[in-house]
Image (cartoon, rainbow, N blue to C red):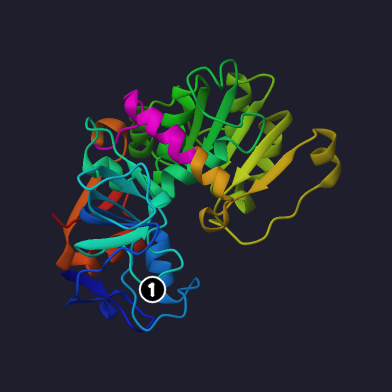
Amino acid sequence: MRAVVYSEKGPASVLRSVERPVPEPRIGEVRVKLARAGVNPTDWKARSGGTARGDFAEITPGQDGAGTIDAVGLGVDGLSAGDRVWLYLAQHQQAYGTAAEYVVVPAERAVRLADSASFDLGASLGVPAVTAHRALTSGDVARLSPGAFAGRHVLVQGGAGAVGNAAIQLARWAGASVITTVSSADKAALARAAGAHHVVNYRETDASAAIRELAPDGVDQIVEVALATNNELDQSVIANGGTIAFYADNGGGTVSIDLRPTFSLNLRYQGLLLYTLAAEHLRAAAADLSAAIADGALLVGDDAGLPLHHFSLEQTAAAHEAVEQGAVGKVLIDIE
């Protein structure tokens, strides 16, 4: 099979195209013939040495993907050859991920993909959508479904990013009034396409005053990409008992918290990282995302505020560079 691998840390140029044997599923595993692979910041950060990459002599990058199961190992129930699936954590704790024609994963990391959903959508889930789900369910709402956020306000900081896009769509599906912040008119258009009810350009207005006007009693849940930069704003607009869920360190790796305003509002700060989430949170995310897809509430593409950028498998290095350089939207590798 065709695959892309690297054996040393470094720039995208360390990636190379190779031929490798088609892997065989072991007990509890399935093999997927991939149609698309998603590229995330975690992929280039691991490749460049910014995050742990595991003690493997050779790595095929890629946590996310979508395709069709073509072989099932012993002990797998509920999945069969021919099933369309989307994948998450495909390369987690193993050497080979989704930048290849085939990948073998534990069965629980392969989730049925509705016939109505494209492989583009399936490969765009994984890291961003599971992260968005956990950011929304880290407070008083434990599961997402229509009406779960009825009467509540959700603030998504950075609504034009992949996680922000998924958070907007999921929060709206759950019945929230969704407010998001952006830094430009172009990104505002993307956030509106995703379904945000209100968009605040923090470079053109007093974001705190604008958000408080929209939610006088404060927002109940904040999905935060840059806590070090936004903590003061978050505290000024959060409701009593609200939750600030942060999933990245954009804007800085440390934050200073003024304690009295924090505990006087009974605030929760919830950090989250996909790779260390408990199994029950991963299962809940997979189930709720599948329900949202079935309802037509989770989409990708220009009309959904998440432009798609397609590369061939042989162009994986260029795909990594596009993500590293901050491509707006979702970068996909076309394998099929």
Question: Dot 1 lies on which element?
Answer: helix
Residue located 40% across and 38% down the image: 165
Depth check: give the residue in front, 121 or 319. Answer: 121
Whether residue 177 is visible to the viewer of this picture, yes or no, is: yes
Relative side of 110 to 308, left or right: right
Vertical order, 5 against 118 (above or below)? below
Whether 269 is among the magenta residues is: no
Residue located 82% across and 38% down the image: 261
Residue 296, image x, y percentages: 31, 25
Whether 299 is among the magenta residues is: yes
Relative side of 288 to 38, left or right: right
Residue located 66% across and 45% down the image: 270
Residue 80, image x, y percentages: 27, 45
Residue 205, image x, y percentages: 53, 33
- Residue on which the image places disc 1: 47
Disc tally is: 1
Which residues make up the magenta segment? 285-301
Depth check: give the residue in front, 183 or 282. Answer: 282
Residue 7, image x, y percentages: 33, 83
Depth check: give the residue in front, 188 or 103. Answer: 103
The quarter in which the N terminus is drawn is: bottom left
**Label 1 crowding class (10 Å Cα cut-off): few <14, some 14-19, many 20+?**
many
Vertical order, 319 against 189 (above or below)? below
Whether residue 329 is visible to the viewer of this picture, yes or no, is: no
Depth check: give the residue in front, 174 or 101. Answer: 101
Vertical order, 165 against 90 (above or below)? above
Relative side of 279 to 93, left or right: right
Residue type, numbered disc 1? Arg
Q: Classify residue 336 by image quadrant.
A: bottom left
